[in-house]
Image (cartoon, rainbow, N blue to C red):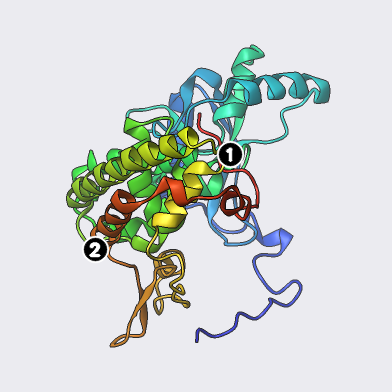
Amino acid sequence: MPPRKTKPKPRSEGLEPGEVQGGSPPAAIAKLTGDVEQEGGHVLASYRDPLGGHWLSLAVLPIDRIEPTPFQRELSDAHTKRLVGVIPKVGRFLDPLVAVRGDAGGFWTPNGMHRLEAMRRLGARSIVVLLVPEAELAYRILALNTEKAHNLKDKSLEVVRMADALVAEPAQAKRPESDWAFEFEEPAYLTIGRVYQERPRYSGGAYMPVVRRCEGFLDKPLKAAVPVRTERAARLMELDDLVAELVGKLKAAGLKSAYLKPFVVARLNPLRFVPAARGPVAGQARAARSSRGSTRDESSGEAKPADFDKTVDQMLERGRKFDAGKVKPQDLAAMGGAPPEAEE
């Protein structure tokens, strides 16, 4: 069992106020200052983050010199309109964007797409940013993006776009997929996201419970992992076609419910009543996310995901034997809970 985390004592972590601007900024901060001036911006101050002690710069950039990272989710017009209505009432822009230097000049923000667009619609000339010298922070979208809650589709699509962007960089493409566990957050997103690319109206929420238990981060190079994910997505689409056929039969039998697809998937799921293994793989952050699988490697004590292809094969076999005529209304009523994620 992993050791229990102890709660930090009050005022025991980080820097004192007087230490935040102590010392000389590193060369990376000096270079960033030059980049800002080159782009027509102005650095207001450079300082050390009071928790981790890392150097940051508070700056103002011309609004046309910053863009969202290119692998983010789609812009929500409704959310942007809400921000456009609220910001003028406050009369101040009080939530700086996090920004890093872009690959081809300019700057990227991994967490401020909607605020940036709102300021553009308000006619702003410039915008305040917190500049971070470590460009890899741009890939930590899911951890940083808190301005609008993600749904499964948003998360999955962002993760596969990140993976594709990393594959386009030769040095990153050679690194194992498992190296990016923090950025990708959940291995199932890498497979379900590929389905969403092909089927925007995919009911990913119905399949997530079983896919999550069959997925772990791969130790293959990222470039080699992408075809594996694409092949697994194709298998999920094959399964989805069969599930859609079975849902049609239930509807033809007079059954009506928002839970028909989750009901069918749950009935086909061979892991449904198999207890999930508990406990992370020792010392690895990714294990906390991928250890929800159904088996455990007894030789190492590590949680191990169920076999993806075997599980899908079993679900397809069960689906071909599924008898819609035996399903009763009370079976559907037993589903209960919140409505499934709406298809978009």
In this rendering, the answer to whether 80 lies above or below 35 is: above
Residue at image coords 28%, 88%: 299
Of the numbered discs in the image, which one, if any, rests on residue 127? none
The answer to whether the residue labelled 1 contacts the one labelled 2, judged by CB atoms less than 8 Å apart, is: no
* Mark 2 closeness class: few <14, some 14–19, many ≥20 residues within 10 Å: few
Camera sees residue 103: no
The residue pinned by badge 2 equals 219
Q: Residue 28 appears at what percent x and percent y?
A: 42, 47
In this rendering, the answer to whether 70 lies above or below 222 is: above
Q: Nearer the viewer, residue 132 or 271?
A: 271
Q: Residue 273 appears at what percent x and percent y?
A: 46, 70
Most extreme residue toward the right is 89
Q: Nearer the viewer, residue 76 or 313?
A: 313
Q: Residue 5 appears at what percent x and percent y?
A: 61, 79
- Classify residue 103 by image quadrant: top left
The residue pinned by badge 1 equals 257
Q: Residue 271 appears at what percent x and percent y?
A: 40, 66
Distance from the alpha carbon under mark 1 to that under mark 2? 41 Å
For mark 2, give the secondary structure. Answer: loop
> Which three-letter amino acid code belongs to the residue tagged 2?
Asp
> Which three-letter amino acid code belongs to the residue tagged 1?
Ser
